[in-house]
Image (tube, rainbow, N blue to C red):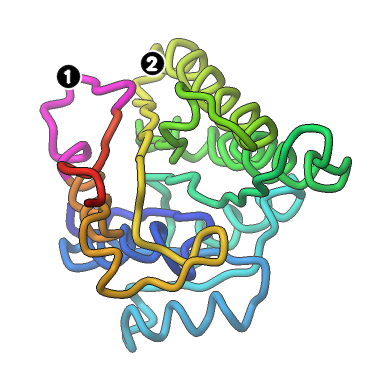
Amino acid sequence: MNEKVAYITGGTKGIGFGIAQVLLKNGIRIAVSGRKQEDAEEAARILSEDDTKVFGIASDVKNFEDEKNAVAEIIKKFGRLDYVIANAGLGVFKPVDELSLEDWNDMIDTNLKGVFHTLKAAIPSLKNTEGYFISIASLAGTNFFENGSGYNASKFGVVGFTQAAMIDLRKYNIKVSTIMPGSVSTNFNGNEPSEKDAWKIQPEDLGELVLDIFKMNPRTLPSKIEIRPSKPNS
């Protein structure tokens, strides 16, 4: 994996940052994006002081032109793109009668359209490297729950989109998977990670999972992976 390149959207914190840490430790060069350039650059600096190995770039996945530019900048800096992890996402949890149009559009545009934008922008490069695309969905993409109508809709969509894209792209030797985590210790939905989150999946656990997927024999494709804490919070 040395010298291969991974692009992680929403990579400035949480799951994306945890994945970046693990991949970087295993010789993969990393590009992380966030909506603000300063956040992306700070995340890259924390990951490594060696700017030949990390790259921070501003991109809002809701904007296709941003993602096209991000991929172009990654190719300009590193010369290739092997792995893409579409991780950027957000959640608003309200009863459907209280969910605003803005809430709905933010989730659909970021969580669902954003994944499409990222993949669409990256496909030409992934064809060149016969690379790998992973979307970070959620167990909310298969299990619906109260106050989750908008979030469920976006994540059900990500799962369906990614699985169909897998079938479309495998003829180019591009591998496509979706990972569906349960509770993860992050800042998602206003949470502040602490010892109380020790029972949850940790971001680096998902990084190890992504690494294992990339290491798998290429004849085998884990196309949809559910992952949850071993034990519920007691």
Tell me what residue is drawn at x 19 percent, y 63 percent. Answer: 27
Give the amino acid at mark 2.
Arg
Callout 1: SS = loop
Callout 2: SS = helix
Circle on res. 220: 1
Q: Quadrant of residue 182?
A: top left
User: Is 227 left, or right, of 160 in this rendering?
Assistant: left
Q: Quadrant of residue 221?
A: top left
Residue toward you, 91 or 54 = 91
Q: Nearer the viewer, mark 2 or mark 1?
A: 1
- Residue range corresponding to the magenta coloring: 212-225
x then y, percent, for residue 62: 73, 48
Circle on res. 170: 2
**Picture layout, residue 172 above or below residue 54:** above
User: Is 178 left, or right, of 28 in this rendering?
Assistant: right
Give the amino acid at mark 1.
Thr
**Picture layout, residue 227 above or below residue 53:** above
Tell me what residue is drawn at x 74 percent, y 45 percent. Answer: 64
Q: Is residue 215 visible?
A: yes
Q: Is residue 216 magenta?
A: yes
x then y, percent, for residue 104: 78, 39
Chain-order first, disc 2 or disc 1: 2
User: Is 29 left, or right, of 69 in this rendering?
Assistant: left
